[in-house]
Image (cartoon, coloured by chain):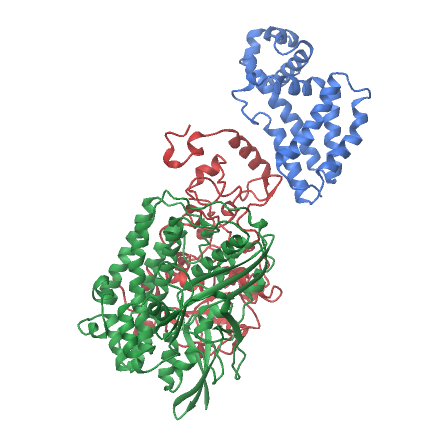
Chain colours: A red, B blue, C green
Amino acid sequence: MILHKISTMHSKNANKPKLLWLQGITCNGNTHSFLNLSSLDTLLEKFELLYLPAFETKHSLEEIVECKLSCDILIFEGTYDPLMKRADASVEKVLAHYAKAASHIIAAGSCASFGGMFKAVSPKRNSGILFDEEEKSGPLKEDDKKVINLSGCPIHPEWLGYTLQMIVNNMNIPLDELHRPLELYSPLAHHGCTRNEYFEWKVDAKSFGSKEGCLFYEQGCRAPMTHASCNKILWNEVSSKTRIGTPCFGCTEPDFPRKNLFKTKTNMSIPQDVPLGVPKRSYLTLAGIAKTFHIKRLEGKLIDYKTTP
Amino acid sequence: MARVTKEEKKHGIITAALKLFSEKGFYITTIPDIADKVGMSVGNFYNYFKSKDILAKELVLYISEYLGSQIREINERDISTEQKIYEIVSMYFSVAQEKPEMIEYFLRVYLSNREVFGEGCEGMICVSPFVTEMMMFFNDGVEAGDLHDQDFFSAFGLFMGYLGGMVFLFGEKILPEPLESYKDDIAQNIYNALKKR
Amino acid sequence: MITKQLLEQIEGEASVYLDLKEDKVDFATVVFPHFRGMESILEAKNALDALVITPRVCGICGHAHLMATVRALEDAYKNTGYDVALTQKVQSIREFTLLMEMAQNHFKWLYMVINPELDKLAKTQGEKKVLKGAYAASLASKAIAVFGGQWPHSSYMVPRGVTCDPTYVEVLQAQSHLDELIKFFEKESLGTLIEAFLAFDSCKDFKELSSDIATIEANLIATGMHEKGFAHDRFLVMGQHAFSKPSKLKGTRSFKVDAKYVSLTDAYAPQEQSYAKNALYKDDFYETGPLARMMASAMPVIKNMHRRYKDSAYTRVMARIFELASILEHSRKLLQKIDVTEASVTELPDIKNISAEGVGVVEAPRGPLLHKISLKKGLIQNYTIITPTQFNIGSSTPQKPTPVQEAMQAESKEDALFIFRTFDVCSVCTTH
């Protein structure tokens, strides 16, 4: 792998869009996830980096909060709290200033998209930059046409990579009603899970720690109800939660984090939530029939597929 | 026009078969008996149902769909869970009174002759429309906070076992009063047993 | 004259107030201006939800939080009378992912913080190698994802086990990522083989070396860091792992440790409200992290460096570099130990049966991370988190300075700020 130097930001910046990354209340998870992007250096060279929290860039945070500059692409990570200060400056003012001139505003992560994990710190005050859960009442509601929500806790680096590259290529990014890019968020986290056959035949995992069994019915997996491409574009180019046996927690949806995450909520043994868009009756009819049949191969360990009685 | 007639003919066979099975018994009734009652040739009969076994299974599906659609109609009404229980009991008992051959077939043929239905009616496949509606009823009841959350089969067994048992007693002519006079108490008992604790 | 310096490129935000007298730091205080209230978010939640919530305390060491949570839960089970012994497979996998997260952290600190800052201090215009750190970190993350599904934020540990059930296909994948990471480290950072590096005896062994690490070592000497940045020469290691030995050290004398002696005090920061609390052990301040761990394990080269240069900034930086090499080497061994036929999870009763307290301690990249949980019928009554930065980067009075305050004492402003960074600050952890 050839590592390019980050361009020294002098002569070649004439046509590069200016990128600025601001933060609200955050754990920095989205920053660290982004740093895992495999073509990071090539991508970053396409921008004039005004400020990024991870490493030294053209300006310091103190210079940024003076609000004398402008950017083309604004990335905001973290829950928005109007009373929060960064470098002694009001986040509300700094965000409002840079949002004005920016042509694209990206909410990086579920906190910035919907409020996320840290909304609970002050539920009435905190929100995402455009949405407060599902309500479009955030500080940038007047600029809503510019806002792209990359929800996820954290974001997948390739989602941000895609979005930035599409912007550089001057391409329109179709969004869903929650402002998430359709090409990334129209699949469900369920698509591509290696346990799909267990889902089809309703062979439920009875506990954690086995590669056999579906995690939907008992272990709280939200994948059939969650818009994300985790099982399509794998995480770290390697795997995903559900593939290795952790239930999806639905982190790209406005109601993240939910409660009682490792257990499926049932009403009289019937799952409260069924796959998106599937009517409950249809689901129950199909599930009932699938449950009737016992596919021997699926009831034992995978490696025993020939010998399971 | 021809298609409608075909459906009507099929429906005719079903009704006739249920009546005969009820009167004479499942094993004694033959295909010619049924064909004769409907007024068609045995050869024509086989155009509708390829064998007695296939007819037997389709009857279960027919009854399940019928009961299922009745329960669905009740489920979709804007009434309380307690009232829905009353309506389901009421519906079940009126079918038992007005179309006794239906419930009888279910209790005395389907449930009691598993060897006939072993293949093609495994588990709950053939009663799926009916079971699905009961699942919806329980689902909605728990979600509304009216019913106690418990395992599906515990609740289903209580509800349907109770009703099936009463209809069985009715069929044996053991009940001194007409079936519908037991409705109120039975519905109340079921509600009290299943309601939120 | 008191000047305020906002620190950037640390995890989160912190400011240092320097009281300068004749251009030397007379006294410094540290302020962490944010507070998130994670501990109150956890109250009344189902205990298992903590496995998803606590990693969000921190994006760079979330995995350590996950392990601290699962250990606290297991401790609560143990205090209720249940056996919580883990299979060797589970121990190895958990420790492997913890170490990979630590390696990821150290690489980033080295290339994104220390290297550029040291270049500035030494006035050497080095080539910008920032993304080397990110690349190495991404390789370590891949190795984590093999078992954990993803990094950051996997939540793949559950009481008495892990959710994954790998075959040797996965173990070999992890090995392959690790091998690539080690090769990268040897070629790009060390300039020698990792075994050779770990066999170094003292600073003299750097003379023949030509590499990023050799340059850092030379720059540390050139900027006098071997004679600056002394803290209290007291160290604390608390997490129980195969790679670290819990112990308390005063210089080189070692003592036993017990989590019950950890206490918290409010920060002393007269200029501005700081939301961080100072962590003390038996009412004293101790340094935690790589230097503490290396001292506890008595690694020969670090012992020699310490003999010459005590707990200077030089020794502190070197300790972390050697810990990085040591972690990579140790991780190789962990993978070889994995027997995939062992159970991934050993059954325990439902958590709703547990009404007890539990403590989980883990060696996070910067030192001991403590999670204390109090459960009632499986619901969280109380949750306390104490992070290593609270041990190292507290803010106390001149009479009783914390390790970082002591280390910055009597240094120039530029030196003091560099010395501050040698402790590797995690502000988000501290302002949970």
Q: Position of residue B51 (x, y in %)?
A: 54, 13
Which residue is painted at 34% across and 48% down in the image?
Answer: C338
Looking at the picture, tell me which residue is in the foreground, C111 or C352: C352
Q: Position of residue A124 (x, y in %)?
A: 62, 65
Residue A229 lies, with reference to residue B128, above or below; the image says below
The answer to whether residue C52 is left or right of residue C108 is right
x and y, in percent, of residue B97 in the image? 75, 21
Residue ID at (29%, 64%):
C325
Task: Describe residue C103's horizontal placement relative to residue A79 as left or right.
Answer: left
Query: Which quadrant holds residue A255?
Result: bottom right
Q: Nearer the viewer, residue A15 or C206?
A: C206
Asked if one can make out residue A148 in the rendered structure from this viewpoint, the answer is no
Task: Determine the residue positioned at 37% across, 65% down.
Answer: C105
Check the image and name the residue furthest to the bottom.
C22
> Is C89 situated above or below C373?
above
Residue furthest left in the image: C208
> Who's the residue at 56% across and 19% down the image?
B117
Is A285 in front, or is C190?
C190
The number of numbered badges drawn on the structure is: 0
Whether residue A238 sits left or right of residue C372 in the image: it is left
Q: Nearer the viewer, residue C196 or C165?
A: C196
Q: Quadrant of the N terminus of chain A?
A: bottom left
Q: Is residue A245 visible?
A: yes
Q: Quadrant of the C terminus of chain A?
A: top left
Q: Position of residue C397 (x, y in %)?
A: 49, 83
Q: Is residue B47 above or below residue C296?
A: above
